[in-house]
Amino acid sequence: MDFQLKTLSTAQAATEKCDALIVLAAAGNSPSKDPIATLVAEARKAGDLGDKAGKLLALYRPARVAAARVLLASAGDGEPASVRAAVLAAIAAAKAADPKRVAIVFAEPTDAVGLRSAMIAAADASYVYTATKSKPEPRSIRQLSFGVADAAALREAFDEAAATVAGIELAKEWANRPGNHCTPTMLAEAAQELAALPHLKCEVLGPKEVHKLGMGAFAAVAQGSAEPLRFIVLRYQGAPKEEAPVVLVGKGITFDTGGVSLKPAAEMDEMKFDMCGAASVLGVFRALGDIRPALNVVGLIPTCENMNDGRAIKPGDVITSMSGQTIEILNTDAEGRLILCDALSYAKRFEPAVVVDIATLTGACVVALGGVRSGLFASDDALADALLAAGEESQDRCWRMPLDDDYAEGLKTNFADVANVAGRAGGAVTAAKFLQRFAGDFPWAHLDIAGTAWKSGAAKGATGRPVGLLLSYLLARARKDAAEPAPRKARKPSKVR
């Protein structure tokens, strides 16, 4: 997407040459008397433009305005969520005329968060998937200009938002691809391509290296598939080497049949989205390469398929994880936590400041929170608060869930150190309690994105969440570290050959 940032008042926007002009008007009266401000005022007075965010009024060749098509879009109270609703509605309406150049102007002054919200919403509304279509139709909108009161003051926010969009769209691209176009090997190749960006490195481990590391849980999930597993290690170094990194761990099941505990046939095609956690990590690193913040980040992606053949793990099997803990497999469809537990053990070698894992982990989280907020579990209150704040700022919200030790009771078994599932009750929590056993040595958070990573039905497709949340968290952390530097020495990670 070609984004542009301009200093445009509503008076200046009246002369802007574009195929469609979208005016974001928050509730209230503007003192301006230019053609566009007058249109907004008259539309409100006549009751043709309501105050509710997302309400639209379409105009064709209004007097004294250069653009042939003008969309007045109510931005409600002007808050980021209202701005997002207005932009989503306006872009959806504008696309009917197949515009190539669209300008979006804020009728009232906006801040960095408002601009970011508008840019991400515009990109979401105009995104088109093309990778596996024989005659792909490119997105009709080729250029999006954003008019604000002072472009220079918002340039940094604009650049960060453009990079965030690039990250979100990379996450969408890989999550939307079907399983035969997104194998673990292909996902690893996508990660290796990111190493061309500044300050980024990528290392990919195969079955032999994973076996040598003792990742028995990860290897067990992969053993029923003809596709070889890959363990992807991404490193972004924007701060001195001795500064402890943030480690992001993304679940990368490129297709999930459920294994021997086979899923129902209905909607099983959507199990290509079971690698959305991995896709979000790729998206974050894509954005980091553009933004280049002053912090260190490590991305770990265990990726494989969960398939059935004569070698596949069976209910009742006992496996040994990298941590040495033994796990009884009661349900082979609870495989995500098995690949993540070994990745969490691997994360310890980086002596991380914090670790955040991201996974489409449980249907129970979908039942609990639907598709609005991701489930957040955290062992550290400060980390939880920071992620919650980042979710609010980015409009990529999460909700903190409990981690009481009582929830772990159902994971007890007579035949191993721990079972991989408990009962149906509190399934999202017991899954998090399982992961917590392997993340006891550092501040840790788990994001269950099973309800937010993709949409079903007519709007079927990946959302790119929680790339926005994670980037907001990382950038806030970088700003805080710049203001209050408190480096923590990290041991140099060992490499496996």
Image (cartoon, grey):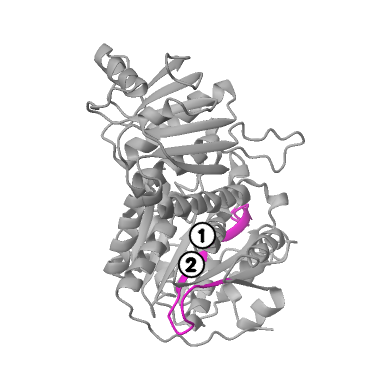
| Screen quadrant of the N terminus | top right
Secondary structure of the residue carrying numbered label 2: strand
Residue 335 appears in the picture as rendered: no
Q: Is residue 445 left or right of residue 96?
A: left
Which numbered disc covers residue 284? 1
Nearer the N terminus, badge 1 or badge 2? 2
Does 273 sit above or below residue 207? above
> Of 69 and 217, which appears nearest the observer?
69
Q: Look at the image and say whether residue 256 sits in the magenta stretch.
A: yes
- The location of residue 163, given as percent across then percent down, is 51, 54
How far apart are the two marked residues, 1 and 2, measured between alpha carbons?
A: 9 Å
| Screen quadrant of the C terminus | bottom right
| Rendered residue at 33%/51% (across/down) | 393
Query: Answer yes or no: do the residues labelled 1 and 2 have beta carbons within 8 Å?
Result: yes
- Please state which amino acid type lies under the numbered disc 2: Leu
The residue that label 2 is drawn on is 248
Mark 1 crowd level (few <14, some 14–19, many ≥20, 10 Å Cα): many
- Please state which amino acid type lies under the numbered disc 1: Val
- The location of residue 478, given as percent across then percent down, is 39, 68
Q: Look at the image and say whether residue 67 sits in the magenta stretch.
A: no
Residue 62 lies in quadrant: top left
Mark 2 crowd level (few <14, some 14–19, many ≥20, 10 Å Cα): many
Q: Which residues are magenta?
A: 234-261
Residue 150 appears in the picture as rendered: yes
